[in-house]
Amino acid sequence: MSEFTHPGAGARVRWVGFQTIVRREYGRIVRIWGQTIVPPAITATLYFVIFGSLIGRRVGEMDGVSYLQFIAPGLIMMAVITNSFGNVVSSFFGAKFGKHLEELLVSPLPNWLIVLGYVAGGLMRGLLVGLLVTVVALLFTHLPIRHPGVIVVSVILTSMVFSLGGLLNAIFARNFDHISWFPTFVLTPLTYLGGVFYSMSLLPAWAEGLSHVNPILYMVNAFRYGFLGISDVSVTSALLVTVVAAVFMYALVVGLLNRGTGIRD
Amino acid sequence: MKALSIQGLTKTYRNGVQALRGIDLDVEEGDFFALLGPNGAGKTTTIGILSSLVTKSAGRVEVFAHDLDRDLELAKSCIGLVPQEINFNMFEKVFTIVVNQAGFYGLPLDIARAQAERYLRQLQLWEKRDAIARSLSGGMKRRLMIARALVHEPRLLILDEPTAGVDIEIRRSMWDFLREINQRGTTIILTSHYLEEVENLCRNVAIIDRGRIIEHDRVSRIIRKLNQETFVLNFRDEVPALPELPGMVARLIDAHTAEVEVSKEQSLNSIFAALSASGIEVVSMRNKVNRLEELFIRLVEAGGREGMPK
Ligand SMILES: Nc1ncnc2c1ncn2[C@@H]1O[C@H](COP(=O)(O)OP(=O)(O)OP(=O)(O)O)[C@@H](O)[C@H]1O
Ligand SMILES: [Mg+2]
């Protein structure tokens, strides 16, 4: 006879459940490290070598710092964005496709918690890769840290926004083509146009105006401000945009899952 | 207490298929219950709704008095599900799969590990605990899903065709195991194509066909009904009363017609002997259609040809 009865539902069950999702996501990141950790580090190194060292030397200064220093925060943020997004989109879609998402759907864990669990997974991978790219950056240039609080807050919020973006993509994806659609046609262009490689002051007025609808611009600039103390936009509004984006995305994703969109027939 | 209570359950899929057309079903705590029906009857749909994998179109479901619409988390915590199709991560280790599922039900890690070991041992999978799930044989994969479903000690275990594609030896050992679990107090609902399985294991059965429950009774009574044939006899002259027919149930429908229920092993000669002795002359006789038997013929066909279209 069993010596315990099942724990039912409630805060304790949710907390243990959340930890379990996080542990499983961590296990996944580590198990397939060749896909999750190595490629972004290689990409980042290439960027630093080509844009930073080779081309950057000719570019000279941008906004009063060396080009290498200017792009370093942007490249770190770019890695955080793509890896947060990529982790959640492939983990959640993989679970949907391989049907083991059902393990979570039959459990007593509510959708808002499942979302938090996947976001935590995206954060883990995003921050881990971000740290790795930072280390690579430090091999090429010196990075001051002017406002550590801004760095931490902006990187965490941005990672959350794009983890939720990955989840949103995975909810609507019905095959593996669908999970590369958003990164290719939306995420990558917005990242490249989001001020990773250039200052807004280089753009004609209309393009600069247009850039301000791109949320990634705000995230990259807040993050860069944290290191270098320079920004194309107001840092307060940048952080505000990111918070609003995170809250909006979270509500949207939880709402969709509660309706069963993409996960229940 | 009722382990399960379903009222007016309907389901229409997005593609317009009406999979359930109003199901009412009660399962008592401690029961070993079968949901029996041919391919496409709506078994998996029903189970999907109970376990929150499918959204219902209408109706009410209560699991141990927890309404799915109001107390979803409590209702879910009472259920352990063994689905029809394999749904674990093929790239994870056997032990990890079971431990994680325990975690999703809120079992702290140390208890989760102990429970996983306990059920992997009971299902003869402990030696395979470090194997990648993909490398298990079909029968092992099914047993892994049973271990996973039991790890949080659910009060209600639901199995959707647990023995499909499993050889007879493993099937029998699974039956023994399920019987034991049931004797320890777990309510079990399983779906099946096989009457033999239901007869062996279950006390009560609901027969579902085209989204409707068409029979709901004790298994023994269903078997008896299946073993019975009904003959309709027509008499030349008016018959005021029937003579005693040994071991059979007979009744007059009108003065010229009677129905006689005969079990399949019984000889028909005795009917005619008794009737002749009373001077009653039979002019014609026909076999009354046995709805249940018709269904079972289809069931047997479905069981014999898995996955074939109806
Ligand atoms: N996801 C779905 N989308 C649309 N129709 C579906 C879906 N799942 C099942 N159906 C349809 O609903 C009906 C009932 O299917 P269900 O899977 O519940 O039957 P079943 O009794 O489990 O059959 P089997 O014995 O073959 O497993 C069938 O007509 C089936 O085609
Ligand atoms: Mg089925």
Image (spheres, coloured by chain):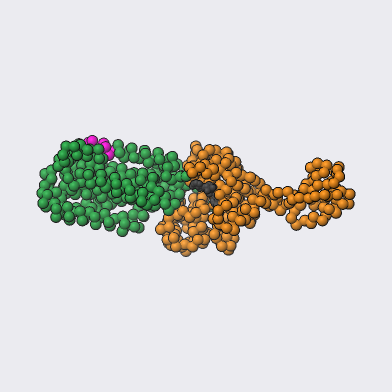
Chain colours: A green, B orange
Q: Which residues are magenta?
A: A235-243
> How many numbered marks have been drawn onto this rendered protein structure?
0
Q: Where in the figure is residue A198, as x and y percent of width and height?
A: 17, 45
For residue B160, say whether it is visible: yes
Q: Quadrant of the N terminus of chain B?
A: top right
- Work out whether residue B118 or residue A173 is closer to the camera in this orientation and state it: A173
The residue that appears at 36% across and 49% down in the rendered structure is: A178
Q: Is residue A54 above or below residue B169?
A: above
Magenta stretch: residue A56 in it? no
Magenta stretch: residue A240 in it? yes
Q: Where in the figure is residue B110, as x and y percent of width and height?
A: 43, 53
Horizontally, is B253 left or right of B160 in the view? right
Q: Where in the figure is residue A128, as x and y percent of width and height?
A: 28, 52
The residue that appears at 85% across and 52% down in the rendered structure is: B274
Horizontally, is A240 left or right of B166 in the view? left
- Which image quarter: residue A213? top left
Horizontally, is A71 left or right of B42 in the view? left
The residue that appears at 61% across and 53% down in the rendered structure is: B299
Q: Where in the figure is residue B88, as x and y percent of width and height?
A: 45, 54
